[in-house]
Amino acid sequence: MPKRLNPRPWSAWLALACLVVPMFASYFFDDMFSSISYLFEDPSLTVLGWNASEYGWYAGAYSVLCVFGGLVVCGILLDKWGVRITGSIFVGMMALGAGIVLWALLHGGAHSLRVAYVGCMLFGLGSEIAGTAVTRSIARWFKGGPMALAMGLQLAIARLGTAFALVMSPVLVSQQAGHVYSLAETARPAMLGVGLMAVGLLLWAVFVAMDAKRFPSAAASETSEEDTFRFKDVLGVLSNPNFWLLGLLCVLFYSSIIAFKKFAGAILIPRFDIPAQTAGWMVSMLPFSTVIFAPLFGMLVDKKGRGTRWMLLGSVLALIAHLLLAFAPAGVSFWGYLSMVFLGFGYSLVPAALWPSVPKVVPDKVLGTTFALIYWVQNLGLMTFKMLAGNILGRYSEASAVASESAVAASDAAAAISDTASAAAGISGPVAVELMFVALCVAALVVAFLFARTSDRHPDLRLDQANG
């Protein structure tokens, strides 16, 4: 069994406490519009004037720099420069990007979407590299110890930031029929998010000081002389089939949940005929459930193993959840809550087993690069599916608006249009989006099965063994 690196366990938990706050702030800011995304169904509802497609375009900006090389290059820098230097640069970039988005929301105007897009790109790259640095740091501080539990706790508290956003945003921007929301009203969640970023920056600085004391020489602590990182090692990661299985599972599974959360209000409100605040509480069950179950499942993986089987079970639960969201009876909120229960369990199970599997399939010297490459694949999918979801909802909203205008002009013509549309499509915008998420879950289940087969064929990887 690997030797524990930290002779004082309390210091590792204190370091973890400092690491989770920047991630809490990141998750809050990323999901601040999720439960109030209905504001963008009709551009006339806000002075900002964004529609659903433009909101989807903005949300997709999070992944642009990550996808086009930034995440991979910065992941390599993480292995070359270490978590203190690289992490500090990108935690700062995360806060800067959030500030630019806030500025765009407060000032509005014709270029607000473009400015916010740039800010979201910087925020996205900063967040992903900060997250990579946090995961890399946990792997180092808890090596040979309760790594899955530590990663589960980090994930749980970070997702509490999502829950906080889902619940607080409808409170900060309360739903009012016929009301046109000012720039300041629309920007309220972003104001709170930037404040949380400031606290996260301070605690990151505390962690850097702790890490410098615990690991005075990053090179000596992380790798031996013969294990020094070289750029050619990236090719070794890319040629590793287990990397691709983990990367594909990550992108398919996370896209079915994170992209869903971005449009949760626009899906849940019409599907189950509920107000925005109820939708916010409903979808907040996802992150709230992970606060409890992600650490518990992390302990389970540490003590009992069987990680690939938990990935399979989590993928099945996510599939059941999206099938309910797509096909359960409309207007019955019970089915919405039940689907969130299944999705919440899946959202806890898969990550609790997936992330501790990464150090088992690659050497320590390329761990930061490997995490970054997996996040790169993930962000490619997230960017694509967020934009697809926005376009699908936007298309159906436009079709509904055309039908409504026709109804006012001529009821007979509107009836004909409605009958034709129903015959041609037979589904609503939210259901159409959910069908996309169902397909993602089916694909994730197939990949999880292949990874479980790999574990059976290669027991030397210890993928299903306890972490100690």
Image: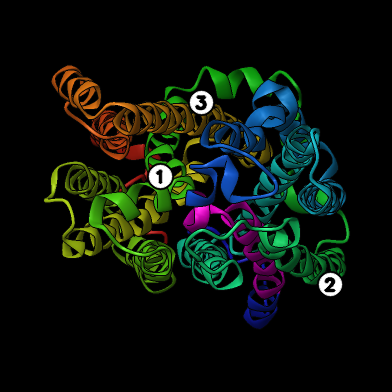
Task: Name the quadrant of the C terminus.
Answer: bottom left
User: What amino acid does circle 1 point to?
Assistant: Phe
Say whether disc 1 or disc 2 marks the residue closer to the N-terminus. 2
Q: CA distance from mark 3 to mark 1?
A: 13 Å
Packing grade of label 2 (10 A; few <14, some 14-19, many >=20) is some
Q: CA distance from mark 1 to mark 2?
A: 35 Å
User: What amino acid does circle 3 point to?
Assistant: Thr
Packing grade of label 1 (10 A; few <14, some 14-19, many >=20) is many
Give the SS element for disc 2.
helix
Q: How is the image coloured?
A: rainbow
Residue 164 falls inside the magenta stretch: no
Say whether disc 3 or disc 2 marks the residue closer to the N-terminus. 2
Give the SS element for disc 3.
helix
Foreground pick, 323 / 58: 58
Tell me which residue sits at (78%, 69%) in the image: 195
User: What amino acid does circle 2 point to?
Assistant: Val
Q: Is residue 366 left or right of residue 428?
A: right
Foreground pick, 168 / 285: 168
Foreground pick, 175 / 338: 175
Q: Report which residue position mark 3 lands on.
A: 384
* Range drawn in magenta: 15-37
Q: Report which residue position mark 2 lands on.
A: 206
Q: What number is the disc on residue 260? A: 1
Q: Main secondary structure of the magenta part?
A: helix
Dots 3 and 1: beta carbons under 8 Å?
no
Q: Where 456 sits versus 184, above or below? A: above
